Image: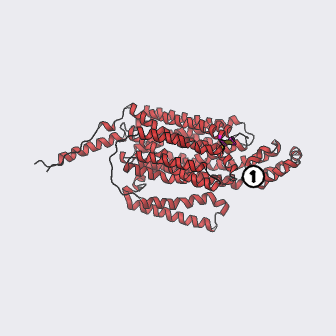
Amino acid sequence: MSHPTPAVEKPAAEFTHRQILTILGGLMMGMFLAALDQTIMATATRTIADDLNGFNLQAWATTAFLITSTISTPLYGKLSDIYGRRPFFLFAIGIFIVGSMLCGLSQNMYELAAFRAIQGIGAGGLMSLALAIIGDIVPPRERAKYQGLFLAVFGTASVLGPILGGFFAGADKILWVDGWRWVFYLNVPIGVAAMAVVARVLHLPHTRVNHRIDWPGAVALIVGLVPLLTVAEQGREWGWDSGRSILCYVIGVVGLAGFLLAERAYKDEALLPLRLFGNRTIAVGTGASTILGIAMFGGLMTVPLYLQIVKGSSATMAGLQMIPFVVGIMSGSIIAGQLISRTGRYRIFPIIGSTLMVIALFLFSLIGADTPLWRTMLVMVLMGLGLGGNMQPMITAVQNAVSPREIGVATGAVTFFRSMGGTLGTAVFLSVLFNVLPGNIKDAYADAAKDPAFQQAASDPGQQQLLAQAQGGGGLSDTSFINKLTDVVAHPFKVGFSDSVHVVYLMAFFIMLVGLVAVFFLPEIPLSMRSAQQQRADDAAQAGAEAGSATPAH
C-alpha cells in the first residue's frame, strides 16, 4: 500500500518584504526592551548603588543578570530549534517583565541582584531568538538590508536609555516612589506592548521535531559557571586562595567536566553539540566573540563611572556623553552590512573591527583625570566603529556556516560565548578596579599633600571629615561625597580613580590583541541567497519527492 506524500507548502517559507517588516516590528519591540534596560542601567547604577548603600557591591547586580542571561541563551537556541521560536520569545518577554517588577521593589543590593537574575533569564532569549528568527526568514546575503532597523532600535535605546536613566535616577520621588525604581517599572508597559505585538504578528511555519532535551548538560553548565563567576566577582574580598575560593574552583571544574561528558553523550541533541566546534567558522566565531565580550564589557563598564566620578557628570549627562560610542556602533554596523550585501564578503570586517578596538583600548589607557572630554569622545567613536564592524558580520558568518536546522543553536552559541566573555570581563575588571583603587587614591593624596594649595583647602574642618572618608576607602560604598569636596581636595581622588581605570584598559588591550589574531583564522564562505525557511522547505520537498519515488507501485 502506497503512502501519500506529505504536501509541502513552499510559499510559506518565502516571505515578502512587507511580511518581513511586520515580523521585524515584533522582534524590534523585544530587542528594544533588552537594549533599553542595558543603557538605562549604565547611567542609573551609581545612584541605585548609593541609595542601597552598596557601590562596592554593584557588580553583583550586573554579574547576576549576566550569569542568568548567559546560561539561558543556549537553552533558548536549542529549545526553539525543536519547538519553534514564537512561544519562547513570548516566554522571554514575560519573565523579563516579572523580573523588572521585582527589581523595582528591591530593598537592598542583594535583593536587587536576585531579581536582576530573574530579569536575565528573560533577556537571554530576547537577543538570541530575535537574531535566530532573522536567520530563519532572511537570506544571509540580504540580511544587511534589515540590519539597519535593528540598529535603529539600539541607537534609539542608547540615546533614550541614558536620558531616562538620568531623569529617574536624579528624581527623588515620582508618584510617591523613589525615582530610580521607575528604571525597572518602565519595562512593564513596554514589555506588555511587545508581547501583544509579537503574539499578533510573529507566525513562522514550524515543523515539530521530537528530540531529547539535554537537561543534564544544562544543569552541569549551571553548576560549572555559577561558582566560577562568583569567585571571579568575590575573589578579592575572600582571598583568591581562601577555602571558599578553592571550593568554587573545584565545583566549577567538576561542573564543566560534567557538561562536556553530557554534550558527548547527547551528540547532535546536545545543548551545544561538540561537533559544531569542528566547523572552523564556528570555532573562530565563538572564540573571537568570547574575547570581544571580555574587552567590550570590561572596557565599557568603566566609561560611565569615569565620566561621573572623574568628570563630575550627572547620570543623565554621562549617558548623553556616551552617544559618540552609539554613533560609532551604528555607523560601523551599517557600513559593514551594506558592503556585505553588495560584495558578499564578510571576513575583512571583523579584522578591521578588531584592529580599531585594539587602537581604541590603547588610547583609553592614556586618558587621565585632566584629559579634555572631546578626546575621550573621539576614542568612543573609534571603539564603537570597531564593535559595529565586528558583531553582526560574525553572526552572519556563523549562521551561513550551519544547516538551517541548527541556526538557533549556532546563534545561541555565539551570543552565549560573547555574554560569557562579558560576564567574566565585568567580574574580573571590576575586581581589579576595586583592588587597585584604594592604593592609587592613597598615593595620589600623598603626592597632593606636598602642594600648599591642597594643604590650605584640606585644613577646612568640613573638608577634613570628607577627606578622611575619601582616603579611608569608605568612599567606595557611597561615592556621592565627592560632589561636596572642593575641586582641589577632590582632584587626587579623581587621579587615583583614573590611574586605576588605566590598569583595566591595558588588560582589555592585551586581551583584544589575542582577539585580533583569532579573527585572521575566520574562513570566507560564499553567502547563501536563500533563507533558512526556504532551505527547510526545499529539503522537505526533496525528501517528499524521494519518498514518493521510493514507494513501490502496486
> Residue 176 falls in which quadrant of the image?
top right
Residue at disc 1, secondary structure: helix
Residue farthest toward the front in the current orientation of the protein: 176
Give the dominant element type of the magenta stretch: helix, strand or loop.
helix
Relative to residue 205, is residue 145 depicted above or below? above
Please indicate whether residue 433 sits to the left or right of residue 186 in the image.
Answer: right
Relative to residue 310, is residue 107 depicted above or below? below
> Residue 304 falls in which quadrant of the image?
top right
Please indicate whether residue 121 sits to the left or right of residue 445 in the image.
Answer: left
Position in image of residue 35 (x %, y %): 55, 41
Q: Name the residue under label 1.
A: 475
> Residue 169 falls in which quadrant of the image?
top right
Position in image of residue 506 (x %, y %): 65, 48
Please indicate whether residue 186 sits to the left or right of residue 438 in the image.
Answer: left
User: In this orientation, does residue 420 appear?
Assistant: no
Q: Residues within 10 Å of mark 1 (few under 14, many from 20)?
A: many
Residue 255 or 156: which is nearer the viewer? 156
Residue farthest toward the left in the current orientation of the protein: 554
- What residue range appears in magenta? 168-172
Residue 310 located within the stretch drawn in magenta = no
Residue farthest toward the bottom in the current orientation of the protein: 243
**Numbered circles on residues, count:** 1
Position in image of residue 256 (x %, y %): 49, 61
Amino acid of disc 1: Gly
Residue 274 or 480: which is nearer the viewer? 480
Residue positioned 78% across, 55% down in the render: 472
User: In this orientation, does residue 61 appear?
Assistant: yes
Position in image of residue 526 (x %, y %): 39, 39
Residue positioned 33% across, 39% down in the render: 534
Q: How is the image coloured?
A: secondary structure
